[in-house]
Amino acid sequence: MTDRTRRLRRESLEAVPSISAERALLITAFYDKHLGRVAAPLMRAGAFHYLCEHKSLHHGDGELIVGERGPAPKAVPTFPELTCHSLEDLRILNSRPKTRYHVAEGVLADYEDVVIPFWTGRSLRDRLFEELPEEWHEAYDAGVFTEFMEQRAPGHTVLDDKIYSKGMRGFQADIDAALDALDFASDPEAQDKREALRAMRISCDALILFAERHAELAEEKAAAEQDPAEKALLERIAATCRHVPANAPRDFHEALQYYWFCHLGVITELNGWDAFNPGHLDHHLLPFYEQGLADRSLTRESAKELLEAFFIKFNNHTAPPKVGVTAAESGTYTDFANINIGGLLADGSDGSNEVSHVLLEIVDEMHLLQPSTNIQVSKETPDEVLYHALRVVRKGYGFPSLFNADAVVAEQLRQGKTVEDARAGGCSGCVEVGAFGKEAYILTGYFNLVKILELAENDGFDLRTSRQLGPKTGNASDFRRFDDLFEAFERQLRHFVDVKIRGNQIIARMYAREMPAPFLSVLIDDCIANGRDYNAGGARYNNRFIQAVGIGTITDSLAAIQRVVYEEGLLTLPELLSAIRADFEGHDALRQRLLNRMPKYGNDDDAADDIMRRVFDASFDCIDGRPTAIGGAHRLEMLPTTSHVYFGSVTGATADGRKAGFPLSEGISPVQGADRRGPTAVFRSAAKMDHIKTGGTLLNMKFSPSLITGDEGIERMSHLVRGYFQMDGHHVQFNVVDVDTLRKAQADPASHRDLIVRVAGYSDYFCDLSDALQEEIIERTEHSEL
Amino acid sequence: MSSTGLVFDVQRFSLHDGPGIRTTVFLKGCPLACSWCHNPEGMSAAAEILVTPDRCIGCRACVEVCPHGLPSGIAGGWAAPRELCEACGLCAEACPTGARRLIGREMSVEEVVDEVLRDRVFYENSGGGVTFSGGEPLRQAEFVLACLAAVKQHGVHTAIDTCGLVNTDDLLAAAKVADLFLYDIKHVDDVVHREWAGASNARILANLEALAREHEAIWVRVPIIPGVNDDDVNMRRTADLVAALPGVQRVSLLPYHELGADKRNRVGMQTTAFNRVSPSPDRMRDLAAMFENAGLLATIGG
């Protein structure tokens, strides 16, 4: 780390997350003036232009890459057109003990006087909730599923290589060509397309204007700068901002700055889920890196310093704060930008290069919360690259996570993508798979499999909310065979998937009509060629995911029921259910038996794993391929983020011995502590799921540091990873931290603020996690040291 | 392949019983009775009940099923006459927490092969395989030989971890099939060996010589037990003896650890308490140097 990097990093770490009302005020002013006067695409493009023109700029001293979404680092703007925070929300954000956002009095006043009065009843969230049917609300309130788009826009897309050879002027030329080609005489959608394309054109101008304002600011700073070296740097930055994004970048520095402006554009226009990210950064930068070394305008060190500055920019961008259920399910500062390292080139050859190693060094040295990083491991990936990544993983920061690049390709081929598009794709957010630069792959919500089983056990009646929530699928006393119970589960499952999908259609349509993203559409193929917005299905590929949660818990519960009720005949199903409803009070021996003596997923025990497969297949069958309102299909994903904690809190005790309210299993990991035959058995169990049919699965692996010391430890980890990937496993992440350290951090958070642990698909500051999550991570860790 | 064997554990992801990621099959019964044994549940050739008192919740399910009327109030312990127990396993089956476990399960060759092949993908990536250990695996020679042959057919690397006190013919028969031998030497002095390991070392050393003539992949393993065998004289003699043998690829020096003490209690052993301090890392390095000086490749740990 250079002195400059050290200073910028410190400033970033010390910046306090706060809420800025600036964007809310600007967008309110714009909407107040124009609402009802122009079509939605032009409204959105106009609003974006207005923001780029008027938002205050920030150029920190000594920065190499410039530009902030808010007025200062970690000053987070809000998006009242989507979700308007109430005064109470803002006060909670300001006072909650974890992941707090500072909210100044002035912000509260602005909200009270201007923002809230305008947006109440107008924000998309208010209107969505009004539009969604009663049964959707009931299921949502009961904790059957969550909804991603109630507070944040559809996002989940990643950039490919297109900006590195084309400036915004070039994109405008493409837009003009598309406009010229419109056939108003015979294409009934031609006028819609014209609006969409004009909006895209305006948003290109907006980004250029935004960059030019940065150029002016840098010129002003340069004029006042006494130090000749800093003055030269400021002039360099000014020249860069004059050149990109209007034109294609000419060198390494311009390439990074160009991406950064695009990034800011995307996350300013809307607050799409999972901050945008550059995708295969090492692939994209290699030509600039090599050219810079060849013409001596760059050294390995100066390239690294630029990349460090680039990483720090991500870290400055705290996620927009959520409210309500979403806050509980994902209380984190991280905005899920996830940079891909390694992987495959479009021609199928190994994509790792020298920049991959530079990136891994940065991850190793910087310990930033954002951006996340992952290594894409294919059979082409050399051991040397994997070993480098594992040496970083071993440090215990949870970065990078590991993906099976070959499976990532196979998953996309199954969805019908071309092999080139699939290889140029990768993973983003936590574990989600997409064709970078060409796809909208949108997560729609977590889905509580364990709650579905609970409903099947209770004839569709939800004990917590005292409602007949689902269809009547039979009394437990009538389930003569295990299959009777399973069929009831399948019927409940299909019903609630139907409810969820109906909601998805309403929401997708609303975003398509009213909340276009013209700037994002410029960046994603084939929105320009199709003359259709990203949110209206303009991308080449469109997939919407439902993320099933709790596969470990439901598998172990069903396996236990099968064993004690239908095989051993130890007690009847109603007897078991009454013990469960009593939260096992007075049934300790039974609970111990359920905890200790039953087949458990994660032990390579077919008695449990066959049930896991059955649940997976049932979920897949009722989700995969069902059309979405904007084209494309629904798909299944096996990812929890932190929703397994929320879902656990609304789910009663379970037949695997879990007490009511405790977290469900996360991702496709076994129930916490249920895997007792070591990591190879966990991998084998997990690989019995057909990962290729998903859009991503998440497996958390716990390792105590002692298991992976020395070169031998690294090789051992690599053998495990290669083995799992050979069996088509999608992803694995390692949490390497000992229990002592975690306990110390709980007792003394102040001195452990920098302790980063792997949570679920992302890493987070341990001290920012809820108590329940902290305990869960400690439990995972303790287990690994047995 | 109708042969069955008495197995007390099949451990996946074994990292210290040969190269790579391995599955270790532990067989019941050992002719030695080393005071420091860390697998005491492998000593007896018969099945037995292992008790973990900490896990007992006092539900008395074991008491209810015990054919010998395990008296109440001692559900977690061994107050019932130990010698009456025939390891019928009813109490272990009834125990909800796993505080009582039946150690020793009859497994067929097919069952062993099925277990072993499960981690094949990891063996292939890591150069691992299966290790038959114990107890003393060659006490159940017919079964182990059948397992070896069956596993070999699938191209899996095989190892035998032996104490050496076995029928020489069995050892040499295994040598024709197994890829690697892990061969334990506790002490070169017969008197000391008898005192601490409960039997003479004469056949162990003779068998090692015989094996070394027939097999080119032997890893000699020496547990380093402070106050028993870790003196310079014994170590040097051990090094000289091993260095003179063809076929020995390396010597693994295994530092004593105390995990065995707790397990010895749990199987209800009445052996005198054996408690030592683990040898220091410095001492281990010195000993490794001694073996290296004799021209051997020496490693510390597995």
Image (cartoon, coloured by chain):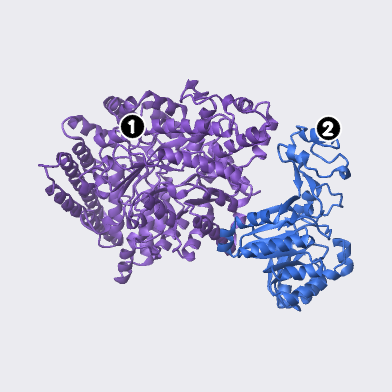
Chain colours: A purple, B blue
Q: Which mark is residue B72?
A: 2
Point out which mark residue A695 bears: none
Residue A612, percent across and down? Answer: 54, 42
Residue A61 x %, y %: 33, 52
Q: What residue is shown with label 1?
A: A83
Q: CA distance from mark 2 to mark 1?
A: 64 Å
Q: Splitting the image into 4 quarters, where does residue A580 fall?
A: top right
Bin the neighbour count of mark 1 within 10 Å (Cα to Cα): few under 14, some 14-19, many 20 and up: many
Label 1 sits on a secondary structure element that is: loop
Residue count near mark 2 (Cα–Cα under 10 Å), binned few <14, some 14–19, many ≥20: some
Residue A743 visible in image: no
**Going by the image, does A441 lie left or right of A215?**
right
Displayed quadrant of residue A503: top left
Q: How many marks?
A: 2
Residue A764 appears left or right of B44: left
- The image shows residue A385, relative to residue A736, as above or below, that is below
Q: Name the residue type under label 1.
A: Thr
Parent chain of label 1: A
Residue positioned 51% across, 30% down in the render:
A488
Q: At 46% from the left edge and 43% from the top edge, which residue is drawn? A: A638
- Give the x, y percent position of residue A113: 29, 25
Nearest the eye: A530 or B243:
A530
Residue A337 drawn above or below residue A303: above
Left or right: residue A187 versus residue A218 is left
Q: Tell if the residue under mark 2 belongs to the same chain as the one under mark 1.
A: no
Disc 2 chain ID:
B
